[in-house]
Image (spheres, grey):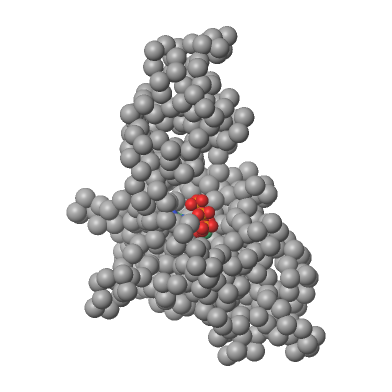
Amino acid sequence: MDKVVSLTKRRGFMFQSSEIYGGLNGFWDYGPLGVELKRNVKECWWRDMVTSHDELATAAGAPMPYEMTGLDSTIIMHPQIWKCSGHYDLFHDFMVDCRESKKRYRHDQVSGRWVEARGQRFFVATQLGGTEGEEEAQQRALKFLNLRAKDAASLAWDGPLVSLTTVAEFSQVLGPDAKALGTLTPPREFNLMFKTYVGALSGEEGAAFLRPETAQGIFVNFKNVVDSSRVRIPFGIAQIGKSFRNEITPRNFTFRSREFEQMEIEFFCHPQSSPQWYQYWRDRRYRWYTDLGLAGERLRMREHHTDELSHYSCGTADIEYAFPFLPPGEFGELEGIAHRGDFDLRSHSEGKLVRQGNDLVVELGPDGKPRHPGSGRDLSYFDDFTRERFVPHVIEPSAGADRGTLAFLCEAYREDSVPDEKGEPRARVYLKFHPRLAPIKAAVFPLVKKDGMPEIAVDIYRALKPHFNVFYDEKGAVGRRYARQDEVGTPFCITIDSQTLADQTVTFRDRDTLKQWRVRVDDCVEEVRRRLTGN
Ligand code: ATP
């Protein structure tokens, strides 16, 4: 990973935000090559999911044809949206930090047991519940006191497992991952949403949030899209945009940032066919990554267990990548695909919902009224073919543009050895990007700066430039120029040499195979197009 990070900085893919002022934790800037790479990731996504989608055919694995359309909603929206979506309550937690393990826990998710032994009374904290929690507490108490399992009878337990919230002061608490007592900080309120103020009002009336996801902008525009366009269910609305989360521990380069970009689809369908659509989107999205080069053991699909599912979800799968900064065998989420049922549209219509048995019901406040009232707008859909009215179910493929970009970069990083001009092996670093993702598609070099070669090279560069992002370089030895392009993942180099002057052909060189072949000057644009598209 260190090599990838150093390459990205050296060649201008990514920089720490505000670096000259010492940086700002959790914020990243994309440099000249990084911006092209990330734009290509987003453009591939938009093109493959939205603009090139064939609405007349039934896509492989889909139950029937479907439509796709796009949206660009605002970052700051009505604050009630976050109350109905659940973010306001869910993202509003009391947290305790452990000074020793550097871990952070939700105050109400830690429990533990008081124990007396060897003249001390202390609270053994655990994140587990029930008998598992009791067993873990026993093991940790024994370990802390340097006792063996056979000494378990010497531990005098004072009451059952109770929540950490019942403990007033933490000096006698053994944190869930700590070896010493008193390492937990007092609970602090923590909200993952960035708060801001709209207009001149600085009080609570003007308070608003920077969106923590782009999805809600889609749900609240569902009716607008249906009423203003001719889309019919099943259809999807796609959106790419910035999201903000005041992450507690931003880390692993851009993987967990506080400002990041999401690429989200909310796909609206009939409740009866929603399980098939869920299956379709899982497979479709996985294939998107493999088509662009994330194949093999480092990419996997992980279906959530039922106890991991959000309260509204009937199924969720994550597409995960084995990022090199993770320990061997561990994967990080690139994208989540969730079957969200009718939770979102109903919440924005009726008010924030909670699960009661198998049903979702409006959560009531102490006054018996909805705790977070919805918009009151009817967000159901009327199918004028079947004459049926229903609240559509939603399948949500939610991807991170930054995590995707980082995965493509990590996957592309290669080292090998190539013969130099004298035939001696020379170590090489190259980025094996899929041509669609490569920031620069081709580089044009005159072999030497004389004999009319630069003039021909400039003509070729100008012929290519309106179609592709190409780069012109006439400085230094040609081997060095190749190496610089390999290092940033340019798939093709085009060299104008003495043979060009004789027969009007140039040398094309392939980044990965190092194969060289000759192409007529007039055919350069077509050759690059053919190679990039694989046709
Ligand atoms: P995690 O569990 O890793 O925090 P999440 O499950 O909260 O992620 P979602 O709410 O499902 O993430 O967001 C959808 C996608 O947005 C994620 O799959 C990821 O690609 C991206 N994403 C979420 N949080 C961040 C972040 N802090 N930095 C970069 N990308 C993020």
In front here: 147 or 74?
Answer: 147
**Residue furthest left in the image:** 21
Q: Quadrant of the C terminus?
A: bottom right
Taking the spot 31% from the left edge, 70% from the top edge, the residue there is 204
498 or 78, nearer to the observer: 78
Check the image and report above or below for 154 versus 229: above
Instruction: Tell me if residue 161 can be seen.
Output: yes
Q: Residue furthest front?
A: 367
Q: Position of residue 270 (x, y in %)?
A: 73, 74
For the point 68% across and 75% down, which residue is it? 392
Q: Check the picture and name the quadrant holding the N terminus.
A: top left
Say which quarter of the image contains residue 51.
Answer: bottom right
Residue at 47% from the left image edge and 78% from the top image edge: 72
Q: Nearer the viewer, residue 3 or 216?
A: 216
Would residue 471 appear left or right of 317 to someone viewing this image? left
Quarter-wise, where is residue 322 in the image? top right
Picture coordinates of residue 403, whole percent (x, y): 48, 55
Residue appearing at x 49%, y 28% in the figure: 113
Image height of 390 relative to 288, above or below: below
